[in-house]
Image: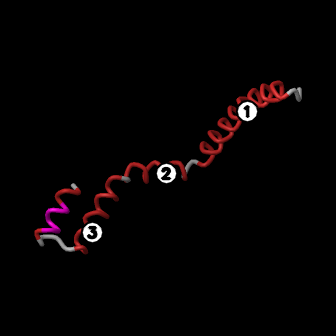
Amino acid sequence: MARDFEERLRAGGLGYGELKKQLFEHYWNYFATARQRRAELAANLDFVHQVLREGARKARAQATTVLQRARQAAGLA
C-alpha cells in the first residue's frame, strides 16, 4: 500500500489531500473491529469492572508472594 502511494505521489497521480483521505479510510477500516469491541465493553461496564477486580486479585496474590520472598531475602521477615 505505501509503495503504491509513493509511486503515485512521485508520478503526479496523487495529491496530498487525496492521500490523506485514502489513508484515513484505510486506518478507519483497519481499526473497525477494535472500535466495535470498545463500544461493546463501554456498554457492559459491569463486565469490565469484574475483569479488573479479578485481575487485581491475581496481581495482589502474585505480589504478596514476591514481596514475602524479597523480605526474607533482605532479612526483614
Contact (CB < 8 A) between labels 2 and 3? no
- At a point 19% along the width and 56% down the height, the residue shown is 3
**Crowdedness near tag 2: few (<14), some (14–19) or many (≥20) residues, C-alpha within 10 Å:** few
Which kind of residue does numbered mark 1 sit on? Ala
Q: Pick the residue in front: 1 or 34.
A: 1
Q: Earlier in the sequence, mark 3 or mark 1?
A: 3
**Three-letter amino acid code at the position of disc 2:** Arg
Which residue position is annotated with label 3? 21
Rendering coords of residue 45 (x, y %): 60, 49
- Tell me the amino acid under the disc marked 3: Lys
Please name the residue that numbered disc 2 is placed on.
38
Q: Quadrant of the N terminus?
A: bottom left
Q: Main secondary structure of the magenta part?
A: helix
Left or right: 7, with 51 as reference point? left
Q: Give me the residue at 78% from left, 25% from top.
A: 69
The residue where tag 1 is placed is 63
Q: Secondary structure at mark 3?
A: helix
In the picture, measured across the screen, residue 44 lies left or right of residue 14, that is right
Determine the residue positioned at 83% across, 24% down: 72
In terms of secondary structure, where does tag 1 sit?
helix
Q: How far apart are the two marked residues, 3 and 1, measured between alpha carbons? A: 48 Å
Viewer-nearest of labels 2 and 1? 1
Q: Which residues are magenta?
A: 5-10
